[in-house]
């Protein structure tokens, strides 16, 4: 089954030989693609006449085939690996930055973030400390959504209008805070293609995992079989609601180990 609309791809850190990843836990590494695999995916899109787009470009719903390319967290490989590959293909992309991680080992520095923006890539916000928004009080939401935006805008000297939810977890309160803060869009982890009727405050994205095959990647880009991924995600969501964020994460790590 194919879903109409544009698929927003979600990436994280890219693995480079002899370079340690930021974290080594199974729950983190499963979302770390090898740099060569990311390159193969972007090459595949280019050879088939598709375009990698930023969030803003994708939401203009251009007539050509394409996907939105997004990265979460603000790892150093955004600039060192992803950006050169995207530039080689003449692709765009949106990098959602966790502002409190800037300057930490394995993450971008403020200068590198400015360099990424100067290369023409769109910069979004991925919170201050990557805290799950659903477990925060009002002060916590302000820190993670509003203060994080202000910090990125201070570094970049330009508006930041796109936000992505850590862990894809959000609720009505967090969306209201994001809207009042001046964000144009909020990206979640809801597995669906985005259409002109999709709420800009609940954009769907599809996470690319380490085990994603080339066949599965192409199917995802075309919006095929997303209902199957969505069904599995609903099961995980139900378990998370029963256990709570912390217990669910501990159980997931134990199961993946």
Image (cartoon, helix red, strand yellow):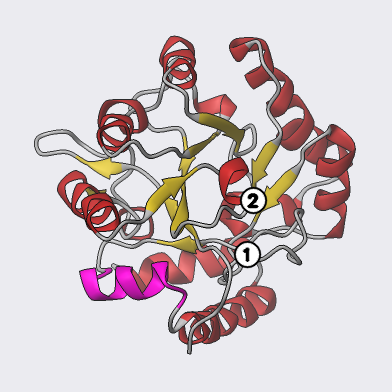
Q: Nearer the viewer, residue 65 or 88?
A: 65
Relative to residue 98, is residue 20 drawn left or right?
Answer: left
The kind of secondary structure element at disc 2 is loop
* In magenta stretch: residue 215: yes
Q: Position of residue 48 (x, y in %)?
A: 27, 61
In what element is the residue under mark 1?
A: loop
Label number found at residue 59: 2
In the image, taking residue 149 as reference, residue 53 lies left or right, namely left
Q: Main secondary structure of the magenta part?
A: helix
Q: Residue at x 58, y 26 (%)?
A: 99
**Mark closest to the chain's N terminus, 2 or 1:** 2
> Going 72% across and 59% down the picture, which residue do you hit?
202
Q: Residue furthest left?
A: 18
Left/right placement of residue 66 relative to residue 180 reads left
- Up-down: is 167 above or below 233? above
Q: 81 or 75, which lies in front? A: 81
- Pointers 2 and 1 in contact (CB under 8 A)? yes
Res 224 quadrant in image: bottom left
In this rendering, the answer to whether 236 lies above or below 104 is below
The magenta region covers: 212-223
In screen coordinates, is 14 left or right of 227? left
Above-or-below relation of 29 to 204: above
Q: Given the current orientation, which residue lies at the most extreme bottom position?
A: 1
For label 1, the residue is: 194
- Farthest-out residue, front: 63
Q: CA distance from mark 2 to mark 1?
A: 8 Å
């Amino acid at each position: 089954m194919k879903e109409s609309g544009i698929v927003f791809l979600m990436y994280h850190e890219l693995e480079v030989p002899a370079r340690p990843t930021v974290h080594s836990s199974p729950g983190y590494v499963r979302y770390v693609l090898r740099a060569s695999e990311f390159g193969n995916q972007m090459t595949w899109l280019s050879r088939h006449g598709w375009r990698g787009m930023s969030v803003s470009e994708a939401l203009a719903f251009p007539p050509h085939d394409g996907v939105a390319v997004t990265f979460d967290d603000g790892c150093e490989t955004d600039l060192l690996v992803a950006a050169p590959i995207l530039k080689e293909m003449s692709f765009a992309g949106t990098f959602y930055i966790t502002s409190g991680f800037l300057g930490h080992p394995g993450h971008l520095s403020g200068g590198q973030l400015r360099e990424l923006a100067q290369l023409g890539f769109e910069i979004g916000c991925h919170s201050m400390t990557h805290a799950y928004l659903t477990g925060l009080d009002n002060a916590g939401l302000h820190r993670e959504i509003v203060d994080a935006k202000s910090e990125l805008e201070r570094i970049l000297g330009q508006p930041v209008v796109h936000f992505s939810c850590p862990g894809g977890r959000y609720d009505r309160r967090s969306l209201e805070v994001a809207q009042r803060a001046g964000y144009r869009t909020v990206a979640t982890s809801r597995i669906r293609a985005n259409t002109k009727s999709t709420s800009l405050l609940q954009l769907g994205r599809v996470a690319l995992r380490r085990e994603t095959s080339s066949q599965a990647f192409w199917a995802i880009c075309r919006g095929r079989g997303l209902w199957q991924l969505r069904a599995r995600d609903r099961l995980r969501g139900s378990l998370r609601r029963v256990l709570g964020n912390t217990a669910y994460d501990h159980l997931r790590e134990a199961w993946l180990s």
